[in-house]
Image: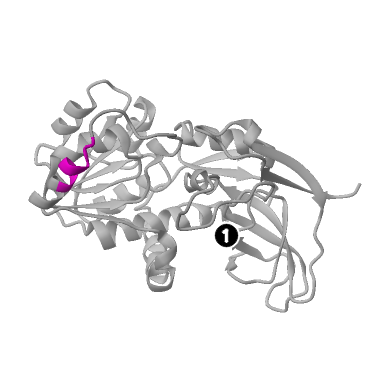
């Protein structure tokens, strides 16, 4: 039976939340590697919130996905064929092959993984881009100090769960915000946060204030929206706010109703001398990645960092899983398994 390359392409740009109609599953011929190239078979595909922004035709830190092009995404892949002396058949690599079964690469940008690693998908989670994002955002921008209060939105997710655990290692009081009682219990009982607030409860502002009696020194921003509104009045003088994402507004098609709150925000930043800094993790690989690998490998080996994967079987299920990610239906790092390793 002839092997085909299944791939999921961007069929149309979403207006508001993505729907199944925005994606199309295609079958094409498996590409042939040329001289200096290798054929990659995707084993695991990472689904992450940033992909929603890449579906828009709007200026950003990275170009949008073109209509009819393969959806972008980080992958763990196995070398199936090689015309490149640097890679052998059977090697495992971390790549950006996107939402497809097969890809051809000249080796640029690939990171070789240990073929014997028991869980290669961790290279897409706690040992990959999400874990690195948590590490740099908290330590380099948040600069947590022992005894300070750190609040983390999306606390059970791939980034937030690591942020909170690193903050605990640095001697901080850590309060998470998550969606639902099950996630909040996990954040406290399994990850070791001091408290976790359910963002779906009607008394979000009051509950967060009660959990932070001494105010907030570091707020790791993944969400925006109502969670940011609840955090803002609790920020202390000289608080730090690493801005990693704003998933609450990714599907928005217009500005929220109500008065312009920008002057009030700017005034608070000024009066309380708050540092609020956005960052894109791709800017930090050259300077900080080796430190991250060293520290995170040690923490994992010592059992000081816990992680959870939300594993979905089958490339064909990626669109539905991605739509669920934007609604908060995933529990842990969302990964699609496309083939056995």
Q: Main secondary structure of the magenta part?
A: helix
Residue 132 showing in the rendered view: yes
Left or right, 134 with reference to 41: left
Left or right, 133 with reference to 233: right
- The part of the image, by quadrant, that contains residue 197 is top left
Up/down of 131 relative to 246, above or below: below
Q: Residue at x 63, y 36 (%)?
A: 22
Q: Looking at the picture, how far across and down is residue 111, in whole percent?
A: 57, 67
Q: Looking at the picture, how far across and down is residue 324, in whole percent?
A: 52, 32
Q: Which residue is mark 1?
A: 117
- Magenta stretch encompasses residue 265: yes
Q: Who is closer to the viewer here, 284 or 178? A: 284
Up/down of 168 relative to 280, above or below: above
State which region is magenta. Answer: 260-266
Q: Who is closer to the viewer here, 86 or 141? A: 141
Q: Looking at the picture, how far across and down is residue 44, in whole percent?
A: 62, 50
Q: Residue at x 64, y 45 (%)?
A: 337
Q: Who is closer to the viewer here, 77 or 298? A: 77
- The type of colouring in the image is one colour
Q: Who is closer to the viewer here, 238 or 170? A: 238
Q: Residue at x 44, y 53 (%)?
A: 130
Q: Residue at x 35, y 25 (%)?
A: 181
Left or right, 71 with reference to 215: right
Q: Residue furthest bottom?
A: 85
């Amino acid at each position: 039976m002839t092997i085909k390359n299944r791939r999921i392409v961007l069929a149309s740009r979403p207006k508001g939340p993505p729907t199944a109609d925005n994606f199309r599953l295609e079958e094409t011929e498996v590409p042939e590697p040329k001289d200096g190239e290798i054929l990659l078979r995707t084993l695991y595909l990472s689904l992450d919130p940033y992909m929603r922004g890449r579906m828009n035709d709007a200026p950003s830190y990275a170009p949008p996905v073109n209509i009819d092009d393969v959806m972008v995404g980080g992958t763990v892949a196995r070398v199936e064929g090689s015309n490149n002396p640097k890679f052998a058949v059977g090697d495992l690599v971390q790549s950006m092959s996107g939402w497809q079964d097969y890809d051809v690469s000249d080796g640029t940008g690939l990171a070789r993984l240990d073929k014997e690693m028991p869980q290669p998908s961790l290279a897409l989670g706690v040992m990959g881009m999400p874990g690195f994002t948590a590490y740099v955002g908290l330590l380099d921008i948040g600069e947590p100090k022992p005894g300070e209060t750190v609040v983390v939105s999306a606390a059970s997710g791939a980034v937030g769960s690591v942020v909170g655990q690193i903050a605990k290692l640095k001697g901080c009081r850590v309060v998470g915000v998550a969606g639902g009682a099950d996630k909040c219990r996990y954040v406290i009982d399994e990850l070791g946060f001091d408290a976790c607030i359910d963002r779906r409860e009607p008394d979000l502002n009051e509950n967060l204030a009660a959990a932070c009696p001494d105010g907030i020194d570091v707020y790791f921003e993944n969400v925006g929206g109502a969670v940011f509104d609840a955090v803002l009045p609790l920020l202390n003088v000289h608080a730090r706010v690493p801005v990693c994402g704003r998933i609450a507004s990714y599907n928005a098609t217009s500005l929220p109703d109500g008065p312009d709150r920008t002057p009030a925000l700017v005034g608070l930043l000024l009066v309380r001398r708050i540092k609020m800094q956005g960052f894109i993790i791709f800017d930090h690989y050259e300077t900080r990645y080796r430190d991250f690998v060293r520290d995170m490998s040690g923490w994992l080996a010592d059992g000081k960092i816990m992680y959870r994967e939300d594993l979905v079987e089958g490339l064909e299920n990626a669109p539905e899983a991605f739509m669920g990610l934007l609604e908060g239906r995933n529990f842990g790092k969302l990964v699609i398994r496309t083939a056995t390793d």
